[in-house]
Amino acid sequence: MIPHARAVFLSDFLGPLDEVELALTKAADRGVRGVLLQVLDPGEEAFPFRGRTIFESVGGSVRHETLKAGELRERYLDRLARRKDALTQLCRATGWQLGLHHTEDSAQTALLWLYRALDGGVQ
């Protein structure tokens, strides 16, 4: 990244955080300001699953089948909350901003937020 540029990291950030942390700290060390925008489906935050459920990554490389999805809910939501907290702490430490966009919402809302965040208008 070019020193003192602006950058956007756009992801669900549900994968390994070490690569995100490395990239973000390198960027911050170069004076790059930016935004992490986490994109989640409402189902990922509500975890409405019960009974037999197959969870599969978009690319199909990760797959998990369970007969009792409801029993996973509390642990999953706890891990999601810890992930969001880790992203918040990472952004706080590097001076970046963290946003959250839900796939059910208009992309226009996320783009407007990104524009304002990159301009320094939101915290």
Image: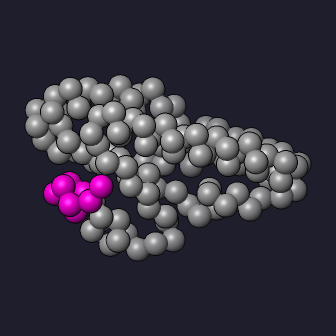
Give the number of marks: 0
* Image location of residue 14, percent across then percent down: 54, 42
Instruction: Please give the name of the residue rendered at 49% of the width and 37% of the height, measured from the top-left corner.
Output: 86
The reply, left or right, for residue 13 in relation to residue 79 is: left
Q: How is the image coloured?
A: one colour
Instruction: Please give the name of the residue rendered at 33% of the width and 33% of the height, measured from the top-left corner.
Output: 93
* Image location of residue 52, percent across then percent down: 86, 54
Judge whether residue 100 can be spotted in this image. Answer: yes
The chief SS type of the magenta part is loop
Q: Is residue 71 above or below residue 27?
A: below
* Image location of residue 59, percent across then percent down: 55, 44
Q: Is residue 37 above or below residue 64?
A: below
Q: Quadrant of residue 82?
A: top right
Magenta region includes residue 51 = no
Q: Quadrant of residue 118?
A: bottom left
The reply, left or right, for residue 103 in relation to residue 75 is: left
* Image location of residue 11, percent across then percent down: 43, 48
Instruction: Please give the name of the residue rendered at 39% of the width and 35% of the height, measured from the top-left corner.
Output: 90
Instruction: Please give the name of the residue rendered at 62% of the width and 57% of the height, measured from the top-left corner.
Output: 45
Q: Nearer the viewer, residue 26 or 11?
A: 26
Q: Quadrant of the N terminus?
A: top left
Judge whether residue 54 can be spotted in this image. Answer: no
The reply, left or right, for residue 71 in relation to residue 94 is: right
Q: Nearer the viewer, residue 7 or 33?
A: 33
Q: Quadrant of residue 62?
A: top right
Residue range highlighted in magenta = 116-123
Magenta region includes residue 119 = yes
Q: Quadrant of the C terminus?
A: bottom left
